[in-house]
Amino acid sequence: AAPAVAAAAAGAQRNPGSAGHPSLCARPCLFFDAGQCNNGDSCGFCHMAHPKRPPHLDKQHRAKLRTLAPATRRAWLLSIIRGKLADLHTSEELETIVAGLADACGLPPGCLPEPSRMARSDRMLWAAMSSLTLRMLLFSLRKCLESEPSQAAAAVDRLEKYCVETVMAQV
């Protein structure tokens, strides 16, 4: 049974949906665990183990997030993304990409928030947002930038590509 498990794990790493697991991968393949995934190595969903219920924002957190000014929301997301990336990997290239993203989002250098100075409800939202995966945070930032110039979305794409190709390859 051990060789079969090792083969399954090796196959899971080759599948495109598992790229960047666990922080940047697609949601889990519902058929893989049952041994019924017909797409195999070309499946767009993750074939690796995930928690039963991924972290998410509850209704109260989503409502609070909608009340934030767009610039504040972008600053929070970028700050949390930067913190998660610092825990995984640090490089000059990554800092350049993140700085370019901050610039494309219209955020001046040094404007990132300090949770310790926030109201209690804001700190609770910050904590909930910090529990999200990097993929969810990048998705949220991309959604927040829908009305912005395409250079901001392109900067998010560059960061996500760099993370999948470089950061997650080292984890």
Image (cartoon, rainbow, N blue to C red):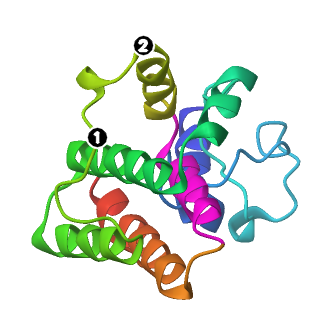
**Residue drawn 69% across and 21% down?**
60
Q: Is residue 130 left or right of residue 141?
A: left
User: What residue is disc 1 on?
Assistant: 113
Image coordinates for residue 81, horizontal then vertical, percent:
37, 50
Q: In the picture, residue 143 is in which quadrant?
A: bottom right
Q: CA distance from mark 1 to mark 2?
A: 14 Å
- Above-or-below relation of 56 to 70: above
Reading the chain from its start, which is encountered first: label 1 or label 2? 1
Is 62 on the left-hand or right-hand side of 153?
right
How far from the left and from the top, in percent, is residue 99? 24, 70
The residue sitting at 36% across, 43% down in the picture is 80
Main secondary-structure element of the magenta-colored stretch = helix
Q: Which residues are magenta?
A: 132-146
Amino acid, disc 1: Pro
Question: In the image, what residue occupies the spot 57% across and 77% down?
Answer: 148
The total of numbered circles placed on residues is 2
Residue 44 visible (yes or no): yes
Furthest residue in direction top, as rendered = 120
In the rendered image, residue 59 lying in the magenta stretch gets the answer no
Residue 95 in the figure: left or right of residue 29: left
- Dot 2, how many residues are within 10 Å of its Cα: few (below 14), some (14-19), or many (20+)? few
Mark on residue 74? none
Between 132 and 47, the one lying in front of the other is 132
- Per the image, the residue denoted by label 2 is 120
The vertical placement of 100 against 144, above or below, is below
Where residue 162 sits: x, y (%)?
36, 73
- Image spot of residue 52 (x, y percent): 69, 23
* Name of the residue lying farthest toward the left: 92
Q: Is residue 23 visible?
A: no
Helix, strand or loop at disc 2?
A: helix
Q: Amino acid at mark 2?
A: Arg
